[in-house]
Image: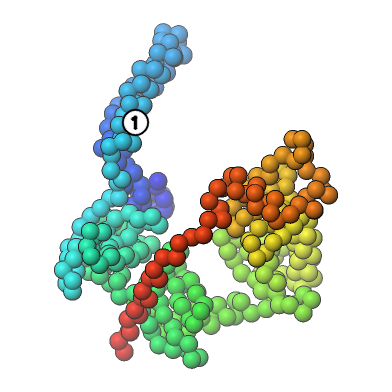
Amino acid sequence: ENTGAEKSKLFPTDLGLVVTDFLSKHFDEVMDYSFTANIEEEFDKIAEGKQEWSKMVGDFYTPFHADVEHTLENAERSVGERELGNDPVSGKPIIARMGKYGPMVQIGVQDDEEKPKFSKLKANQSIETITLEEALDLFKLPLALGEHEGQEVVINVGRFGPYVKWGEQFISIPRGEELSEIDLKRAIEIITAKQIEDAPIGFFEEKPITKGKGRFGPFIKWNNLFINVSRAYNFDTISQEECNELILKKVEKESNRYIKQWPEEKISLENGRWGPFIRFGKKMIKMPAGKKDTKWTSEELTNISLEDVKKMIVIQDPKAFDKKSSGKKSAKKTVAKKKA
């Protein structure tokens, strides 16, 4: 995985480096530069009728498949682990490695009585180059900066990057800004900018319309509905009439989307592109065939009971309604206070 262009250059990510090291260790023949040249030469012979393609594929695949099976059984998961030093307070090792959600550093190991502490690397940091001092700075978070309008202001790094937490609101910090340079004054500026951005741009049926930019582009929000704004509209100068038009289209689409809903169970029966399906939480579950292996009629779908829908869910997910054992609540994170 290579990402990030700077003056026509490509830079490998931490994940790319870890994957490359793993492949080089366990599949050195395939990763060798001469492998591609040899394969191309054999392809030329096949094209000229001088070699059987089936023999060529067999000669490659048989030993390669054996290597794959051996690797699956014996290779340890590669995390690109790099020890940086020891924590001056606890004396525990500080390690930079790949985690479930990307590159991270940790204090301590799993074998310790006390669980390790974890922190995500910043966007401009790498497992290969991060220093002990930089790693220690990451564990100063979350950091309380002070209060604004009676609510605490805290900065931290989350799964999707650095943010300001104000009361119960989480606000992303603009790209390019270093957390170490964010003081209370700058945090308040970020909060104020977000308030202006989230201010209603109009009203529909006496409910506010707001706008924003998300993962899939610009949108307006009304009555908990997120409505994408296409390029046919000027997002910066979108009018009340255009918002009304978009909302009405979305409401009509949503009304045709649901066949039946059981909100308290997080279950709904919906119309999809390929026919009706069951939505259970975040899962999309295919509807089985109707009576006598025929398609469901509109009347049958309208009259279907919650119990019958649950049975369909259990067929595909036997543990769907098993009661989850309540685990111990994790201890609350302590918030460091920024020195004046």
Residue 143 located left or right of residue 222: left
x then y, percent, for residue 115: 28, 65
> Residue reaching furthest right?
299
Secondary structure beneath label 1: helix
Q: Is residue 179 visible from the viewing direction of this image? A: no
> Residue reaching furthest bottom?
150
Residue position for label 1: 69
15 lies above or below 234: above
223 lies above or below 281: below
Residue drawn at the location 41% of the way across and 80% of the way down = 154
x then y, percent, for residue 300: 80, 48
User: Depth check: 261 or 203 in front?
Assistant: 261
x then y, percent, for residue 328: 39, 68
Residue drawn at the location 53% of the way across and 51% of the way down = 319
Kindly identify the amino acid type of the residue bearing the numbered disc 1. Answer: Glu
Q: Is residue 47 visible from the viewing direction of this image? A: yes
Residue drawn at the location 28% of the way across and 43% of the way down = 76
Question: Quarter of the image holding residue 136?
Answer: bottom left
Q: How many marks?
A: 1
Quadrant holding the C terminus: bottom left
Residue drawn at the location 51% of the way across and 59% of the way down = 323
User: Depth check: 102 or 293 in front?
Assistant: 293
